[in-house]
């Protein structure tokens, strides 16, 4: 009986040893728990990589969008600058063309028998632009003026038509008569200015200077004020009074910079500078 008990004990011990020995020899990589953990680790790593790549992709897209916006802004700025430069050049060309046409008109009137240009006496001090030499008034016309009807508008239109038709002496007489007959007319400042233009085209610069200065002195609110100041500068230029010409032209550029008169004044100032006056 004792022998049987010992046999049973040995068999049980052997079986336990076999089971324990079998577990101990199972490779760890075949452990289901370890396999599951490694799989989870791999999946997490892949997710992290995907999230990182997705974040970089979104950041790259945002950067590209910003670059596109910046390029668009640069393009808009360049386009605006080009348009502004083209407009400035076109305006400059218009003023150059206008100045050239005025000079051509002056030259043509001189060729067709206009009065010779008056020269400023070398021994006479320049007269300030604000108080030009008073020219002797031309006699007011007594002959009927074509188209004049005795009203301010009718008489003004008749005088202006003579000026447009290059009948400068007749227009001088007509505008002079208008100023005498209609001193309080709303067109009196215009008539005074065009009287100066008629003298200017006839190259009677001293008388033209006096006529333009009267616009400045008598009609400070006139729409013809910038053009009158410009012509004061032009007349002094033609008379060789460089300082007075520059003073008048600078006044135009300072007060009326963005007007045709302001740009023409700037062109004439540049011409004076180029001529070293």
Image (spheres, grey):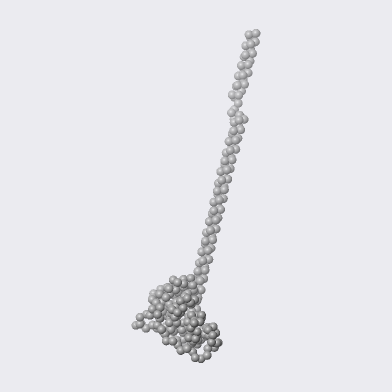
User: Observer-nearest residue: 61 or 171?
Assistant: 171
Q: Residue at x 56, y 45 (%)?
A: 55
Q: Residue 159: x and y, percent?
A: 52, 85
Residue 266 in view here: no
User: Observer-nearest residue: 181 or 164?
Assistant: 181
Q: Quadrant of residue 233?
A: bottom left
Q: Pick out the residue farthest to the left.
A: 123
Q: Is residue 62 above or below residue 48?
A: below
Q: Pick out the residue farthest to the bottom.
A: 143
Q: Quadrant of the C terminus?
A: bottom left
Q: Residue 138: x and y, percent?
A: 45, 88
Q: Quadrant of the N terminus?
A: top right
Q: Residue at x 54, y 85 (%)?
A: 151
Q: Is residue 33 above or below residue 11?
A: below
User: Observer-nearest residue: 36 or 235?
Assistant: 235
Residue 45 as seen in the image, left or right of residue 236: right
Q: Residue 91: x and y, percent?
A: 51, 71
Q: Residue 181: x and y, percent?
A: 49, 86
Q: Pick out the residue farthest to the front.
A: 184
Q: Residue at x 48, y 80 (%)?
A: 189
Q: Residue at x 53, y 87 (%)?
A: 150
């Amino acid at each position: 009986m004792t022998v049987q008990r010992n046999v049973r004990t040995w068999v049980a011990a052997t079986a336990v040893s076999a089971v324990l020995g079998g577990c101990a020899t199972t490779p760890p990589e075949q452990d289901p728990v370890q396999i599951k953990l490694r799989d989870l680790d791999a999946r997490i790593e892949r997710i992290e990589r995907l999230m990182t790549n997705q974040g970089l992709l979104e950041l790259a897209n945002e950067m590209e969008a910003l670059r596109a916006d910046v390029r668009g802004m640069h393009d808009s700025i360049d386009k605006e600058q080009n348009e502004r430069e083209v407009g400035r050049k076109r305006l400059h060309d218009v003023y150059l063309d206008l100045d050239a046409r005025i000079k051509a008109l002056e030259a043509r009137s001189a060729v067709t028998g206009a009065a010779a240009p008056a020269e400023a006496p070398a021994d006479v001090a320049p007269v300030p632009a604000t108080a030009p030499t008073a020219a002797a008034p031309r006699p007011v016309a007594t002959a009927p003026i074509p188209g004049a009807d005795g009203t301010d508008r009718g008489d003004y239109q008749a005088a202006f038509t003579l000026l447009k038709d290059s009948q400068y002496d007749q227009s001088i007489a007509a505008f002079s008569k208008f100023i005498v007959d209609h001193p309080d007319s709303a067109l009196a400042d215009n008539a005074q200015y065009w009287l100066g233009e008629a003298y200017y085209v006839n190259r009677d610069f001293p008388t033209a200077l006096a006529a333009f200065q009267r616009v400045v002195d008598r009609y400070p609110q006139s729409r013809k004020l910038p053009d009158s100041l410009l012509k004061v500068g032009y007349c002094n230029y033609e008379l060789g009074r460089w300082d007075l010409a520059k003073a008048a032209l600078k006044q135009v550029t300072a007060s009326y910079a963005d007007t045709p008169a302001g740009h023409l004044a700037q062109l004439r100032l540049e011409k004076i500078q180029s001529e070293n006056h």
